[in-house]
Image (cartoon, rainbow, N blue to C red):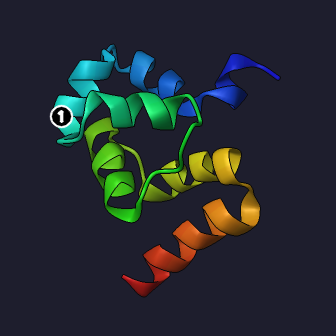
Amino acid sequence: MEAEERRPLEVHRRRRLLTIRALADKAGISTSTVVAVEKGHKAPRFGTMHKIADALGLDPMEIAEFAEIVEGPETGKAAARNDLAAA
């Protein structure tokens, strides 16, 4: 598995020349949250998904795809899509 497939958030962050701290500051979240989501230790919550997406100039569904990598299709991406559809 290529690095881009394993850590898509990190790839997007690096393409924008942002450090973890810079992304966290821009998104208004903690650096530990960025690290945990980047490394796949936890899926982002709905609000966090939107903050990260806005900070990176991405569609929130792209962040939801990161959740699928972390949690699997039923709990990650599907849950995120349900949240977005309900919003």
* 66 horizontally vs 35: left or right: right
Q: Which corner quadrant holds the N terminus?
A: top right
Residue 24 % position (x, y): 25, 31
Q: Is residue 79 shown above or below 26?
A: below
Q: Is residue 56 left or right of residue 35?
A: left
Q: Residues within 10 Å of mark 1 (few under 14, many from 20)?
A: some
Q: Nearer the viewer, residue 44 or 26?
A: 44
Q: Most extreme residue toward the right, as rendered?
A: 1
Q: Nearer the viewer, residue 37 or 8?
A: 37
Q: Residue at 47%, 28% (x, y): give it.
A: 12
Residue at 16% x, 31% y: name it. Answer: 25
- Residue 19, how many percent across, how many down? 31, 15
Q: Position of residue 11 (x, y in %)?
A: 52, 22
In this rendering, is residue 68 above or below 9?
below
Number of callouts: 1
Q: Is residue 43 above or below residue 45?
A: above
The residue where tag 1 is placed is: 26
> Where is residue 69 drawn, in percent x and y?
69, 45
Quadrant where the C terminus sits is bottom left
Residue shown at 67%/66% (left/top)? 75
Considering every residue shown, the one lying at the far bottom of the view is: 86
In the image, is 75 to the left or to the right of 25? right
Which residue type does callout 1 highlight?
A: Lys
**Image quadrant of residue 47?**
bottom left
Q: Along the line of sight, which residue is nearer the eye, 18 or 34? A: 34
Secondary structure, mark 1, is helix
